Amino acid sequence: MIVLYAVVPRGVEVVAPGLCGHDAGPVTVVYEETATPPSPSRDAVAEHGRRIVALADRGPLLPMRYGTTLPGMAELRSIGVDHGDAWRRRLDRLAGRRELVVHVAAADVAPPVDGSGRAYLQWRLRAVRRQDHAVEKARELVLPWADDLRLLPDRRRLAVLVRIGDADRVRDAVAVYAAAHPDLELVVTGPWPPFSFCEGAEPS
């Protein structure tokens, strides 16, 4: 079984223990051969992420979603032929960029004391609106540096694609805004490989 990790430009050295590289036209597919499917454990997912982060230190890459597998080398060679040029174009777009994640939380407001269903629903609606407003303010704040923006499924995090040299500027701008708005909790993590901007990278 082949476990896929990432696609990198051809010629990038793959030195992580246990990982191999398969050249596919203008790119190299980084993979691992294993006899068993990837474990669903948190430790296994974290180790997969650490390997991708280490690869990202060497240059642009397209991370593969954890658990992306192929039956064997024949299938790997086939997808390389089918996807190599498209992967190269995606890599060119991501060159020199990283992902920041802005965690956004509006301050909690105590729920109603009367316990009625109507009062609770109104309270929940106000909470959702506060959170959506906080996310929108965060989006406006980082937009000047963003090549791309994605609201993540939990609706409490923004993935922001930025140039590597702008990462500290974004972090500083968010910190200054957060200090002036104690009703919001804004935290920036990263820079990370562009996990949120590689849709369609996995072979179908």
Image (spheres, rainbow, N blue to C red):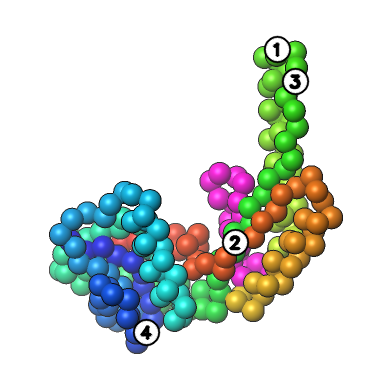
Can residue 29 be spotted in the picture?
A: no
Q: Callout 2: helix, strand or loop?
A: strand
Q: Residue 124: x, y in percent?
A: 68, 28
Q: Which residue is drawn at 74% across and 58% down?
A: 140
Residue 161 lies in magenta, yes or no? Answer: yes
Residue 119, given in percent of the width and then of the height, sits at: 73, 18
The amino acid at mark 3 is Pro
**Numbered disc 3: secondary structure:** loop
User: Residue at point 56% right, 44% down?
Assistant: 154
Q: Name the residue under label 4.
A: 12
Q: In this view, does 173 lie above or below 27?
A: above
Q: Distance of mark 2 from mark 1, alpha carbons?
A: 39 Å
Q: What residue is disc 3 on?
A: 112
| Residue occupied by mark 1 | 116
Residue 68 magenta-drawn?
no
Q: Which of 186 and 146 is in front in this view?
A: 186
